[in-house]
Amino acid sequence: MPPDAKHSAPHILSPGLLTAVWGALVCLTGLTIALARLDLGFWNAVAALSIASVKALLVILFFMHLKYENRLLKWLLGLACLVLAIFIGMTFFDLAYRGLGTP
Amino acid sequence: MTEAASPQDSPARGFLTPEPGRGGLASWIFSTDHKRIGLLYLTCIMTLFAVGVCLGLLMRLKLMTPGNTIIAPQTYNAAFTLHGVIMIFLVVIPSIPASFGNILLPLQLGASDVSFPRLNLFSWWLYVTGALVALVSIFTGSGAPDTGWTFYVPFSERTTTNVSVAVLAVLILGFSSILTGLNFITTIHQQRAPGMSWRRLPLLVWSLYATAWIQVLATPILGITTLLIFSERVLHLGLFDPSRGGDPLLYQHLFWIYSHPAVYIMILPAMGVISEIIPVFAHKKIFGYKMIAFSSLAIAFFGSLVWAHHMFTSGMSDVAVLVFSFLTFIVAVPSAIKVFNWLSTLYKGSISLEPPLLYSLGFILMFSIGGLSGLVQGAAGADIHVHDTYFVVAHFHYVIFGGTGLGMFAAMHFWFPKIFGRMYHRGRAAWAFGIIMVGMNTLYFPMFVMGLEGMPRRYYDYLPQFAHAQFISTVGSWVLALGLLLMFHNLYAGLRRGAPAGPNPWGAATLEWSVASPPPKENFPEPPVVSKGPYDFAPREHHV
Amino acid sequence: MSEKAKDYAGAKLGMWLFLFTEIVLFGGLFLLYAGYLHRYRADFHQAARDLNTLLGGLNTVILLTSSLCVALAVTALERGRQGQCLLSLALTVALGLGFLVNKFFEWSAKFSHGLYPGSAHLHQLPPGQEVFFGLYFAMTGLHGVHVLVGAGLLSTVTLMVRRGRVRQEDFVILENAGLYWHVVDLIWIFLFPLFYLIT
């Protein structure tokens, strides 16, 4: 059955909510710049990428409306991210072990 | 059959009827009808296939005897590069999805067209543009590309031949492929007729669905890879240049992250075609519908995890060699599931040995030989011996030509009466099949032997010990060409003068056979409501 | 084809699939970045100091704000406020162009310091730093092209809204153009820490 059969009026996001999300995004940007000035070694990169992921999630869920879309789109986005993670992650089977075991 | 059909028994022309008010060519190249677009693709693909075959024949002719013969070494390098680029990017990748997929997908779903008809036409235009740019790369600049279709760095960054233009062509073709995939996924989700549940989808649709996902998720990597080669050559970014800190192996990773899944873009639709044909000619419900559908998705997924098995001898880490070798063996499982299910469908079936079934059986034989020889190379130890030898060449020609090629020919013979409303000469089709099989095996089997004996691929010359096998192989190429000529001639003759075929000459049960042949422009005069599966055949009354 | 001209869910699904391809396209470059960061950690940290965090941060805020604007434009049109929608869209495009102007000054400064693809100065740096700048130009360059395309797309949609071809009852084109713009923003959200904050 075509899924658009039950397509009803779309969910409208209020300007207030959108502005609040924007505020959160700007605050997170400030936070990540501030954290970068501390020397946390390895954790610098972890912190920066975690904050970036949270920001990305906010953009996807609210600005891109995914929170209110059907389950199919959420699953497919997950699939796309999984595939990209596989491409990058499995390359490290080579990169992380290159040169080991050879004289 | 022998006489020209008289006007009264010539079939109604359906979507082939000329459109009033629009000229002949314009009514095709600006049409958004998926059936016309599919035929446009089919025409282009077959034309380019002929070009690729000629390049292949030229190479075989050169290799018939050792030494400096009819063509110079540089010409030979260009010939195998162009043969690869044309056959892979312009023929095999679009082959079944873009032509038969376009024609059949909406029909099999019970829809009037794909989700985005104009985008569909745009993909075809991109395809033509890509083909023209590829052509330009041959005749302009300082010589045709000589890198092989893989464009490996650092040579592809440094060669003075026209690689920049060629990679742009590949980029454009990749974009075309992505748009087709995107269109198909949306169509399968959105355009199914009432009652066409996921469990009633024909298996061709399932395979096109899996293929489309690879097209959407892997092809962008090809896009960025070709863009990077282009910018390396023009801007000298140095991302793959060891003297500038780059890592050439990362290029190989990127290239194969796309190009390995791409071989499943090539083979999955052919498997779908075979899954359609076998139950029809065994007149028996397909064995293991769910497993065949599932194995398409499994092949698409696991096929994305094995790319580095092309790099066992490249100097990548031993851990990666072990991991990717292991995963390679897993892909064999869903492929084997399909073969076993096809054979089980045939078992105790009421088999009519028509040309489409012949080509399908040829597919199973050739694909099995090719697939099993693939495992030899998937085993890391054995691969070191056969890597970059004729063994690899034999393997992928068995899989791609013997698999996808024969699958394509099977599709052509199966849906020919549906698309054109006429029937070809079946006896001649069987003869052509026999000659093609003999030719193919004579051409490619000696390559297995030469590969094991150490004959490297892409070499212009060879040691005297290979002379016999090379000679046999070249003779095989002539036999194969003869078979292809006979096949195309037979189809062309059927197109001009074949007897009217009727809506359902094979007694098949999928939706496309429920409408007239050729199908009317709007596909279904009445929107269909589906109440049975794709392989629930009516009891047979007479032999077709 | 008129009877199914408006398949709202289909148009959305198609757009999302296209966005996946954009994400994977950049994903190839992120793969290279990850590989080279692993190999040249110290060089990357050193090279990233040359980038102006303030300018990068400013550009981040500009893009985030433009993303807000395009989301507001969708809301406005959904509520039937065409004028508000047009204003938000114009603001989005303006901010996008502002991002590019900023980028232009940033790149010019790099060029004047002899840091451009294939330069002799770059070649004298340690290999890791040369790769860092290669990636910097490749990734921000490709992103810049996407900003340009997105701005062009939104300008076209602005015209369509003005002419009433995109309206309250039928706005999926605006939504899809907005989705594209958000993905451009999304990619910058990752580019910013990777190039400016990795010091």
Image (spheres, coloured by chain):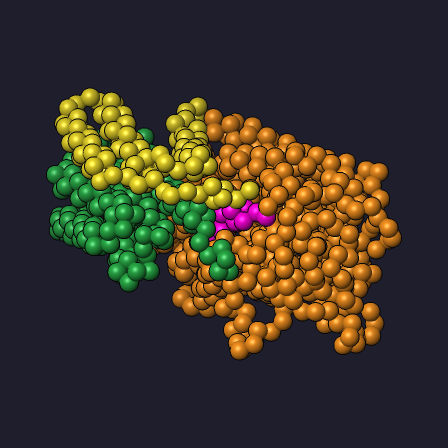
Chain colours: A yellow, B orange, C green
Residue B110 appears in the rendering = yes
Q: Nearer the viewer, residue A70 or B2?
A: A70
Whether residue B68 is situated above or below residue A47 in the rendered picture: below
Left or right: C145 in relation to B404: left
Looking at the image, residue A43 sits to the left or right of residue C16; the answer is left
Residue B25 appears at what percent x and percent y? 54, 74
Q: Quadrant of the N terminus of chain B?
A: bottom right
> Looking at the picture, does residue A26 appear above or below residue B263?
above
Depth order, front residue of B149/B421: B421
Image point 60% across, 39% down: which residue? B198
Who's the residue at 47% across and 44% down the image?
A4
Residue B356, x across and y down, in percent: 75, 53
Q: Which of the two residues, B90 or A51, is positioned nearer the viewer here?
A: A51
Q: Quadrant of the C terminus of chain B?
A: bottom right
**Boundaries of the magenta span:** B178-193
Is residue B41 visible in the rendered image? The answer is no
Compared across the picture, whether C114 is left or right of C15 comes to left
B171 drawn magenta: no
User: What residue sits 60% from the left and 40% below the top?
Assistant: B197
Compared to A82, does B442 lie above or below? below
**Position in image of residue B340 (x %, y %):** 72, 35
Displayed quadrant of residue C127 = top left
Residue at the (18%, 34%) spot, across then down: A23
Q: Nearer the viewer, residue B236 or B254?
A: B254
